[in-house]
Amino acid sequence: MTRTALVTGSAGFIGYHVAARLLADGFKVVGLDGMTDYYDVTLKQRRHQMLSQSSNFTPIEGLLETDGLVMDIMSEHKPDVVVHLAAQAGVRWSIENPRAYVDANLIGAFNVLEAVRAHPCSHLLMASTSSIYGANTVMPYEETHKVDTQMSFYAATKKANEAMAHSYSHLYDLPITMFRFFTVYGPWGRPDMALFKFTKATLSGTAIDVYNHGDMSRDFTYIDDLVEGIRLLIDTPPVRPDDANDIEDGDSLSEVAAWRAVNIGNGEPVQLMAFIEAIEAALDQEATKNFMDMQPGDVPATWAQADLLKRLTGYQPKTDVRTGVARFVEWYRDYYQV
């Protein structure tokens, strides 16, 4: 039978790619997006237009925090799977406009959980973030590490989402997977992300801001690799253990709930300067660099331990940065005709 998936944030960068993959796999997809103006709405509208070329896609425009909206969608469409990606993103913007994160990330996530409680599905998957590891210095980051030192309000709201989801999973026996993704990039990306900004600036001859004087590293994850991980996790819902001793070492499965956190990352941190060199190589143009101090709320490095994803699904992200950046640049040049 054809399965139905609700994808929140379906006009966003990751949401668009997840929805497209599910449509390709034969799902009916209900896509909810608020079309907020945090970045170019035209880009979001274009993504929804492409998804709408499929008769199996149902677009809905509305804000997660709108009372009753998600509940009505769950009641009407009765999705088998919910992939909750909609959120106010961005570490730096959370310092300037924290209220937006309360509305979208806290109230919005609560509305999703309440709707799934009232209309249970086979699996709820919710987006978390590598930023949740905060000030942790032990790397690579493992899902079983303590995550109590968030460095930004954005990360704090995602930590709250994980705790909220755990309580609902325990109370109402809902299978919930929190996927923590690491610096996702690729075609149709977000204009506020470094790759997008660096590419645009370099092509226009404008200097790029290089924070912490370039002494930073990120576990960059290509969008297709992230989507593959999410797609495989959909069919791997957690099950509440009968006994805590049944949980394998390294598994973040809760002792008291059908709840699990899973990293999705390459497991290979890349220095920021090497990332910039990959952009320069793809553009065949050198960037002018403006070296700056670290920004508030940022962390110097991220690095995913991705063994749990591989153990659960048999999959491990593998796209190297030079290949992924080249694909983005190709898309960017085509989309903006530059």
Image (cartoon, helix red, strand yellow):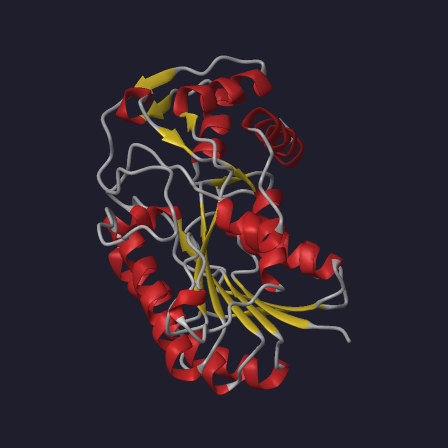
Q: Nearer the viewer, residue 61 or 263?
A: 263
Question: Where is the N terminus found, in terms of image quarters?
Answer: bottom right
What x and y, as percent, mark residue 146? 27, 53
**9 with respect to 77 (left or right):** left
Quarter assignment of residue 201: top left
Task: Tell me the residue at 33%/33% (across/down).
Answer: 301
- Residue 138 in percent (x, y) is at 29, 38
Answer above or below: position of 142 versus 72: above
Q: Tell me: 48 left or right of 257.
A: right
Task: Report the label total.
Answer: 0
- Image height check: is 29 above or below 42? below
Give the left or right position of residue 327, taking residue 110 as reference.
right
Q: Quadrant of the C terminus?
A: top right
Please tell me which residue lies in front, 13 or 177.
177
Visible residue check, residue 26: yes
Q: Residue at x 52, y 17 (%)?
A: 280
Which residue is depicted at the point 47% across and 24% down? 275
Residue 32 in the image, given as x and y percentages of width and height: 55, 67
Q: Position of residue 248 (x, y in %)?
A: 45, 58
Q: Quadrant of residue 198?
A: top left
In this rendering, the answer to whether 320 lies above or below 179 is: above
Residue at the spot 44% in from the left edge and 43% down from the top edge: 182
Taking the image as drawn, is residue 45 in sight? no
